[in-house]
Image: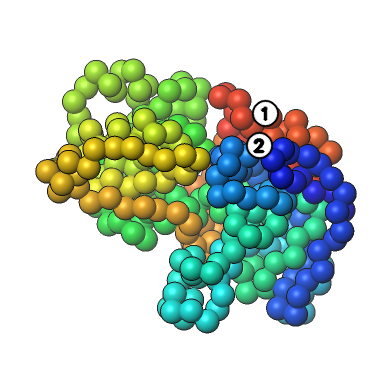
Amino acid sequence: MKALIFDGKIALRDIPVPDPGPDDSLVRVLMAGICKTDVEITRGYMSFSGVLGHEFVGIVERSSDPSLVDARVVGEINVGCGTCTACMKGMERHCAHRTVLGILGRDGAMAEYLAFPTANLRIVPDSLSDEQAVFTEPLAAALEILEQVKVEPDNRVLVIGDGKLGLLVSMVLRLTGCDLLLVGKHPEKLELFAGIGGRISLLDQFSRTDDTFDIVVEASGHPSGWELGVSRVRPRGTLVLKSTYQGTLTFNAAPLVIDEITVVGSRCGQFGPALRLMEYALVDPTPLISGTFSLDRAEEAFRRSMSSDSMKILLKI
């Protein structure tokens, strides 16, 4: 089968079809999404080597659960050991021995086939297109904020970053009725949120204000987003960190101590609520799609995803 592999460089290669284990399913991948995390992996993030990709939708061809055969599915990307304290508490996302699809110790989904634990698969509602379903993982990551932080309707909330994740976070948080502002550098990306009634501001304009917020979500993917977030969260407010990037972050912790700021790291979320949001037409992520490429053009698609004017790039397998 063909697969997009990173081993110091990106290349489309022919590799064997994976052999599913006794608790696994063999999934024929229909579509995969290219994520900012995938780009960071090519820069050294997580020291990953193997098949890229963790956002996918596919059809089950063989399974340890016969009822899933021919079902269209997406997959929770964290695979726990199943026996540690975290796993026993249902916190597989925080298992110290976990593997993560296309990110940590497990080949990913930018391939014609994927072997994946059956317990991690979630059936996609018939009403959702493949283009919608492939957004399940990043939309779940956006929803994770609401699992961690109570967002009140009268809270002032700032989202920093107009990339894919920042826009999805904004689409989710606006459903709480909070006073929400999305700040970014790209007018055409900001307009995607303005088009559904969201409030936006270009970074240059926002920098000339001194507004502070109850909750700040940093989703810029750049260390400068942290600096802006710290400067705009009110005393005893909450700063939520969604960005992942290669390298270290150097900062002065004194403002956090002095203003008694709560800092919340936020990563992966549950797929069920994300699928329901799309099924109930509360969030439509498809306007974020900038292009769809065949797997044979995967290297080109990856380069396109790295351009500043690109949003979500999809691979149709």
Q: Earlier in the sequence, mark 2 or mark 1?
A: 1
Q: In this view, does 260 lie above or below 26?
A: above
Q: Residue 255 sits in which quadrant?
A: top left
Query: Hey, what amino acid is under mark 2?
Result: Ile
In the picture of the structure, the residue carrying the numbered disc 1 is: 304
Q: Where is residue 20? Give x, y as percent.
A: 78, 71
Query: Hey, what amino acid is under mark 1?
Result: Arg
In this image, 311 relative to 23: left or right?
A: left
Q: Where is residue 148? Give x, y as percent.
A: 34, 59
Q: Where is residue 119? Give x, y as percent.
A: 63, 74
Q: Is residue 101 above or below residue 45?
A: below
- Decide: marks 2, 1 in contact (CB < 8 A)? yes
Q: Is residue 303 above or below residue 58?
A: above
| Alpha-carbon span between mark 2 and mark 1 | 8 Å
In this image, 152 relative to 314: left or right?
A: left
Q: Which of 237 and 108 is in front in this view?
A: 108
Few, some or many C-alpha atoms within 10 Å of disc 1 (few <14, some 14-19, many ≥20)?
some
Determine whether the residue tagged by mark 2 lies in a helix, strand or loop.
strand
For the question of whether residue 131 can be seen, the reply is no
Q: Which residue is drawn at 29% across and 37% down?
A: 251
Q: Which residue is drawn at 63% across and 50% down?
A: 48
Q: How many marks?
A: 2
Q: Where is residue 65? Give x, y as percent.
A: 73, 79
Few, some or many C-alpha atoms within 10 Å of disc 2 (few <14, some 14-19, many ≥20)?
many
Determine whether the residue tagged by mark 1 lies in a helix, strand or loop.
helix
For the question of whether residue 241 can be seen, the reply is yes
In the picture of the structure, the residue carrying the numbered disc 2 is: 313
Q: Residue at x 50, y 40 (%)?
A: 246
Q: Residue 212 sits in which quadrant?
A: top left
